[in-house]
């Protein structure tokens, strides 16, 4: 599985944060919410479960920080809805 690293308002795969092979980006909204606004996976990593791994890392981060996720990214929203085990960090605010 890909090595996921923490960057500035993102988790990413690759050697350089500014040119990642895959990433999930977010912004803090207040002190209790994380707005996930983008998920990207390069063609060379597609089909390997990297996007799902990024969402899982984001969910873990939200739990660690005791925050909720507002999924504005369509992929993240779909995964949050699909996985009942993520509901504890899914914000009711959209």
Image: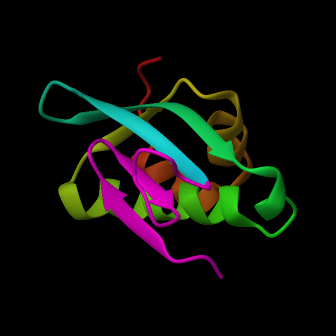
Which segment did they paint magenta? 1-21
- At 15% from the left and 24% from the top, the residue drawn is 30
What colour scheme was applied to this rendering of the protein? rainbow
- At 53% from the left and 52% from the top, the residue drawn is 20
Between 54 and 90, the residue placed more toward the observer is: 54
Q: Is residue 62 magenta?
A: no
Q: Is residue 20 left or right of residue 53?
A: left
Q: Is residue 3 magenta?
A: yes
Which residue is the extreme one toward the right? 47
Kindly indicate the quadrant of the structure image that contains residue 74: top right
Q: Is residue 26 left or right of residue 77?
A: left
Say if 40 sits above or below 92 in the image: below
- At 81% from the left and 70% from the top, the residue drawn is 48
Residue 33 image position (x, y, % from top left) = 27, 33
- At 55% from the left and 32% from the top, the residue drawn is 38
Kindly indicate the quadrant of the structure image that contains residue 6: bottom left
Q: Is residue 86 left or right of residue 27?
A: right
């Amino acid at each position: 599985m890909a090595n996921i690293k923490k960057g500035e308002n993102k988790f990413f795969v690759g050697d350089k944060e500014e040119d990642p092979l895959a990433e999930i980006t977010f912004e803090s909204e207040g002190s209790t919410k994380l707005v996930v606004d983008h998920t990207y996976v390069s063609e060379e990593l597609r089909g390997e479960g990297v996007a799902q791994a990024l969402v899982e890392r984001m969910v873990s981060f939200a739990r660690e920080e005791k925050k909720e996720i507002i999924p504005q990214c369509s992929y993240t929203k779909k995964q949050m809805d699909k996985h009942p085990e993520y509901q504890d960090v899914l914000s009711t605010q959209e």
